[in-house]
Image (spheres, rainbow, N blue to C red):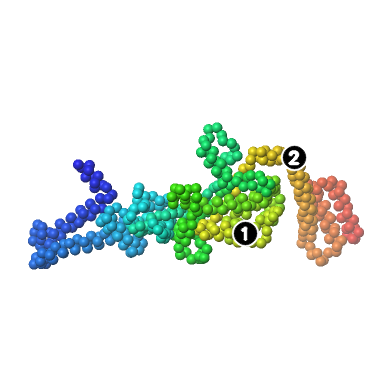
Amino acid sequence: MFTKIKRFLSHPHNKPAVTLSLGFAIYLYLALRYAGFVGHSPDPRLAHAPLWVRLSFVGLGAIVLALLWGFFFAQFVFPSEYLWERGKIFELIISHVLFGYGRALSMRNGRLISRKGELRKFAPGVMALDTASAAVLRTATNFTRAVGPTKAFLGLAEFVDTAFDLRLHSRTLGPYEGEDPFLPQAEGESDEQYEERQNRRWSTSAKTRDGVEVVARITVIFHLDDHPDGISEADEKGRFRTELHGHAVSAWRAAISRPIDMEGAEAGEQGRLLNWGWIPPYIAVDIWRESLQRFSLEELFRLKPRDGMEEEATALEVISKAINERLTKPKYHPLAAEDGFLPEELESREYRILQEHGIRVKKVVLADVFFPPAVERELVERWAADWLTRARNERETVEKQRRLAAKEGEEQAVRDLGQLVISRACDGVDISSITPRECAVRLVEYTAKLLHDNPELFSFDHGEVAELERIAVYLREDNGG
């Protein structure tokens, strides 16, 4: 019996009612004693009042006091910044007590947390969202509003349609790392696993200009747009109050324009609607296929100068830049018919589509590419046949650079030595007061002295140094010195 009573009192549906009933009973007892109905004579001010007055005093006093205390303690039940929020919390407390258990939801990192059966319950409620979460709410017939971090009060028929994580997102299409999509079904690999591996292959499969299949692993990094088009970056109205990303307009667009998966249409509404975050990688794959067909297999790895690239680049690097430009910038440079990019700019339709879906892409990474086994063997054999020629060409290039650097070093050393000789030989002498012959004597004498004191500067022998000294003596004697 005591176990049943304890279970009844601890049940979340009964706790508020039991607590309120106990408090109301205590207050009613004290009020009845004050009015003279229990225990002793009434207060002198109520002694001659009619019975209905005393009963009204007790009843109205109990109701008013319960409402005042309920409104006061509402601010401690749930954090509130404004008076109207405290009123909403008080309203939920009253409905909780009178009509039963309402909805209390929470959202962490874009994941909704609730008790079983609470999401679709027809009752008002409240939802707490951390700084990395936002949501779009709806009724059974229409979307209602977008809510961001802190809290949101749910209407009688409102529920969460789409939950958002406001941090950076990363989505990858294509084979897993270390996986070969072209291998036949391996021993021990089930039909379902093999089919999934092939689905990953076909998700990014594309063909070069000469008809060779190439499969890529493509990763897109993106987030909910901070400043949708038409909204100034200086205008923070609608911006979610968080250090992360997100705007009410972006969340609204991402929720109402989610892509449809026709294969999952039989599963109902939730089965046919894809996650909003899969739009960027699918668009990136479309650009990958469009760009790859401009190049042949041989051009993919050929390093050479290309228009629009700062340094020599391969065709794969050109394709990677083309994908990034079209997803991250409102205007892009189109690919040329042969190599590189054209100088004119075009409006990026893909960027506009992402903005219409409330998404901002930060970066696209072309992580890896895969070829059929026969093509890969051919590439290896071609590389093995050409490596010696490439090595010799690289050696000649390095040797030319070395000789050029040595020549430039010699010339620079001669210039430095000349400047040193001139500065030391004419130190403290007024150039305008001496004759050109005297200046020449000074230069020759100091050069001979410098080489005599520092023989490691040149490979001159002592005979050449002595010759410099004789030249200096000759110039001096010829000058009458």
* Amino acid at pointer 2: Leu
> In the figure, is residue 243 to the left or right of 467?
left
Nearer to us of marks 1 and 2 is: 1
* Amino acid at pointer 1: Tyr
Please identify the quarter of the rendering in which residue 30 is found. Answer: bottom left
Question: Vertical placement of 161 versus 181: above or below?
Answer: below
Spot occupied by residue 335 in the image (x, y as percentages of width and height):
66, 56
Residue depicted at x 91% and y 59%: 478
Q: Give neighbour class at mark 2: few <14, some 14-19, many 20+ (Cα, 10 Å).
A: few
- Nearer the N terminus, badge 1 or badge 2? 1
Q: Give neighbour class at mark 1: few <14, some 14-19, many 20+ (Cα, 10 Å).
A: many
Residue depicted at x 55% and y 60%: 352
> In the figure, is residue 221 to the left or right of 308?
left
Residue depicted at x 73% and y 39%: 385
Residue 332 marker: 1
Q: In the depicted view, which residue is nearer to us: 73 or 107?
A: 107
Q: In the depicted view, which residue is nearer to us: 237 or 269?
A: 269
Please identify the quarter of the rendering in which residue 49 is found. Answer: bottom left
* Residue 169 at least partly seen: no
Image quadrant holding the N terminus, namely top left
Structural distance between the alpha carbons of marks 1 and 2: 40 Å
* Residue 433 at least partly seen: yes
Q: Residue furthest right?
A: 478
Mark 2 sits on what residue? 388
Spot occupied by residue 208 in the image (x, y as percentages of width and height):
66, 47
Residue depicted at x 15% and y 57%: 29
Q: In the depicted view, which residue is nearer to us: 245 or 430?
A: 245
